[in-house]
Image (cartoon, rainbow, N blue to C red):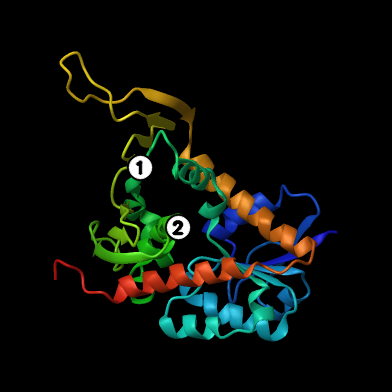
Amino acid sequence: MEIKLGIIGYRNHAAKLLSILQNKRDVTVKTIFHPDKKIDDSRFTNNFNDLLDTDAVIIASPNHTHFNYVEQLLKGFSGYIFCEKPPVTSEEELTKLERKSSSEKARIFFNFNLRFGGLNEIIQNCINSESMGKILNLQIIHTHGFAFREKYLSSWRSDGEKNLHNILDAISIHYVDLLNLNFGQIQDSHYFPQLVSENGTSFDTGHIFLKYNNGITASIMNSYATPSITEFLMIGTNGFLTIRNNETILLSPRDTFNSEGNFTCPPALKRTEFNFEDEWKSSHEKSLEYFLTCVSENNPIPTNQFKSSIESNRFLLKLKTSKPEWQ
C-alpha cells in the first residue's frame, strides 16, 4: 500500500523528517502546509484542507501550535496523526487531549523517538544485569552552542513569550520520557532553568534532578549555550556504564582491588561504538517506521503510547510552574 502523507512545517525538524521520508518506499509526501509562507515546491500549500486528502498528517510545527492542529485534524480528517513532542504546551490543552475518545486516541502518535533507539536498549539491558547490579543513579548531559548562532535569534526557540522553556520542550522531555519508561513513577524533582547566553528571551539552559519511587536518582543537563557535549553515565552496585566520545564502556565488578588491597576502577568488560548523532537519526527513522506500519496495516496506536506521552507532558508542565530552588 502506498501511503500518502501531509506535513505541517517545512524547516528545521520538519526538514529532517522530510529527508527521512523521501528515502522510504511506498511513501509519498503529497502536501506540505504552512499557514502563510510561500516556497517553490509543487507540494506546498497555504490551504489547510489540502492536507485532508492524505492517509496521515505529520505535525512538525512550533510547539504552541500542536494542539490546535490536532484539534483541526480530528474534526475533519479520518487518517492518522503524527505529532512532534511535546504534545501540548498547557494543562488545559492536556486535559482536553485526555478527554478524546478511544478511537481518536488510537489515531494519534506522539514522537518520543528515543523510545525506539539504541539508548533505550542499553538501559533495558543494564536493568537486572549481574554486571551492573542494582541501578542507583543516571547522569545525562546533552548540550551545544545553538544560542550563540545568528539564526537562533530569528527562531521560535528563542521567543520567551511563546516558548520560555524551549530547552525543556525540545531536548529534556526526550530524556525524562525515556527514564520514566524504564524506571516508573517520579517521587521528587527539582528544575533549574537559566538564560545563560543573554540571546533571546527564553531559557537556553536547564538542569533537572529526579528521584524515582524505587530509589533511583537521575540528573539531566541540557543547554544551547555550551560546547557540544553528549555524555551518559549509569551507576550500579556492581558496575557502571559510560557513553562518551562515541564509545560505550561497561566496567565491572565492584570488587576490583589494587596490589595494596584498595578498591580500584573495575576493568572494561565490554566496549562498543555508540554515536549520539546516529542515535537521534536512527531513532527518528525507527519511530517513523513504527508509525507508518500502523498506518499501512490500519492498526490502532497502542493506548500505552498515548498514555505515557501524556504523563511525560504533564510532568514537564509541572516543572515549568514549579518555583526554582534558587528563587
Q: Which element carries disc 1, helix, strand or loop?
A: strand
Q: Quadrant of the C terminus?
A: bottom left
On screen, residue 237 above or below 61: above
Which of the 4 image quarters holds residue 3? Answer: bottom right
Closer to the camera, 59 or 135?
135
Per the image, the residue denoted by label 2 is: 174
What's under tag 2, amino acid-wise?
His
Question: Does any portion of residue 52 appear in the rendered image?
Answer: yes
Quadrant assignment, res 70: bottom right
Foreground label between 2 and 1: 1
User: 264 left or right of 185?
Assistant: left
Looking at the rendering, which quadrant does residue 250 occupy?
top left
Percent position of residue 286, x then y: 63, 50
Q: Is residue 225 left or right of residue 269?
A: left
> Left or right: where does residue 155 sit relative to residue 33?
left
The residue type indicated by label 1 comes to Met
Viewer can see residue 42 = no
Instruction: Please tell me whether residue 235 is drawn above or below residue 87 in the rendered image.
Output: above
Name the residue located 42 percent from the left edge and 80 percent from the top edge: 90
Residue 172, horizontal then vertical, whole percent: 38, 58
Q: Residues within 10 Å of mark 1 (few under 14, many from 20)?
A: many
The local secondary structure at tag 2 comes to helix
Q: Badge 2: few (under 14), some or many (20 or more) residues near its Cα, within 10 Å?
A: some
Residue under circle 1?
A: 234
Residue at the image point whose x is 77% and y is 58% from the top? 28
User: Where in the figure is residue 318, as x and y percent of width and height?
Assistant: 34, 74
Q: What residue sits 49% from the left and 30% below the top?
A: 273
Residue 116: x and y in percent read: 57, 51
Residue displayed at 44% across by 86% down: 92
